[in-house]
Image (cartoon, rainbow, N blue to C red):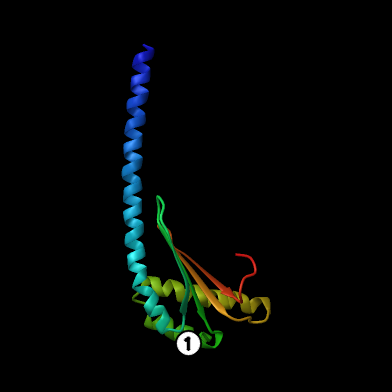
Amino acid sequence: MIDKLKKAFQETADTLREQAAAFGEGAKEKGFQLIEEWLLIFPKLELYGLEVTSFALGVALSPSLDVELKGKHEDFSRERLEQILAETKSSAALTSVFQTIRTAYMLHRRTMANLNSPLIVKVRIRLSPEIKVYIGKPLVE
């Protein structure tokens, strides 16, 4: 009886390991596909005045790409951001970056704080992309 239970547990564990490996490979493949798509976006962001200043690739079960871009506040006035958003509405990636910049500026204005330079946009590409906008250089990263 104990041998039958051990065998059943071993077979279940083997099946779970195989499923986890298959899921891991699928996640890795999807992650690299997403990174490939974003590699086409960064040159377009540079055309709008956001210079790539840092680039890092993390390879794991779910790969990630961390890219930092730097820009000038004067290149992203309210009017200019609205114009950029109208120009980029066909690209979800570009739209998400510029909407995040616009929202960061709107929230920053509500604080009545000084507009410190530079404008920093950090994009982390993974299965769930993340975009952060810094106004001024963060002291803690």
**Residue at left offset 36%, top offset 64%:** 35
Between residue 87 and residue 2, name the one nearer to us: 2
Is residue 40 found left or right of 132 in the rendered image? left
Image quadrant where residue 31 sits: bottom left
The residue shown at (63%, 65%) is 140
> Where does the image place residue 137, in percent across and percent down from the top left?
61, 74
| x and y percentages locating residue 100 in the rendered image | 50, 72
Question: In the picture, residue 30 is in which quadrant?
Answer: bottom left
Q: Position of residue 106 (x, y in %)?
A: 58, 77
76 lies above or below 124? below
| Residue beneath disc 1 | 80
| Residue sitting farthest toward the top | 1
Q: Give the residue type at disc 1.
A: Arg
Q: Residue at x 34, y 73 (%)?
A: 40
Percent x, y of residue 116: 63, 80
Q: Quadrant of residue 52?
A: bottom left
Q: Which quarter of the rendered picture does the C terminus lie within?
A: bottom right
Few, some or many residues within 10 Å of mark 1 (<14, 14–19, 20+): few
Residue at point 31%, 50% (across, down) = 26
SS for tag 1? helix
